[in-house]
Amino acid sequence: MHNKHIQTLKAVFAEPVRSNIQWNDVEALLRGLGAELSEGNGSRVRVYLNGVRAVFHRPHPAKEVDKGAVKSLQRFLVEAGIRPE
C-alpha cells in the first residue's frame, strides 16, 4: 500500500466519523488492498475483497463520501479482515 492509501484508511476509521473523504481516494484504497471493483447499475460499485462482497453508491453530485457510507465501508473492511494499523 502507498502512503496515500494508509492515510485514507486512517481517515475511514477516524473518530468521529468523517464526511470529507474523497470517493476517488476510497476506490484507490480498495484497489490498493487488492479488491476487485466492477460497475453496477447507475452509480453502484460492486466490491469484492478477501471473500467479502459489498455494493456502494458512488456519491454525486458531491465527490465526498457521506458519514453513513463511511460507516458501511468500515464494516466492510473489518469483515474483510482489514483494520487500521
Image: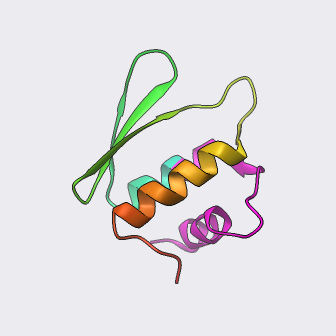
Residue ranking furthest to the left? 51
Compared to residue 1, the image places residue 43 above or below, namely above
Residue drawn 41% across and 70% down? 82
Q: Nearer the viewer, residue 15 or 6?
A: 15
Is residue 52 positioned above or below 80 on the image? Answer: above
**Which residue: 57% across, 31% down?**
58
Which range is magenta?
1-26
Q: Nearer the viewer, residue 83 or 21?
A: 83
In the visual, does 37 lie left or right of 30?
A: left
Relative side of 13 to 16, left or right: left
Residue 16 image offset from top left, x and y in percent: 77, 65
Residue in the picture at 76% in, 57% down: 18
Colour scheme shown: rainbow
Q: Position of residue 32 (x, y in %)?
A: 41, 61
17 versus 44 height, above or below: below
Tally of numbered tags: 0
Residue 34 percent across, percent down from the top left: 32, 59
Q: Horizontal placement of 85 versus 80: left or right?
A: right
Side of 57 relative to 39 (left or right) = right
Name the residue at the bottom extreme. 85
Residue 73 rendering spot, x and y as whole percentages: 52, 52
Is residue 24 in the magenta section?
yes
Q: Quadrant of residue 8?
A: bottom right
As for residue 5 lying within the magenta part, the answer is yes
Judging depth in this view, the residue of 20 and 69 nearest the camera is 69
Q: Image quadrant of residue 12?
A: bottom right
* Quadrant housing the N terminus: bottom left
Residue at the spot x=43%, y=61% of the render? 77
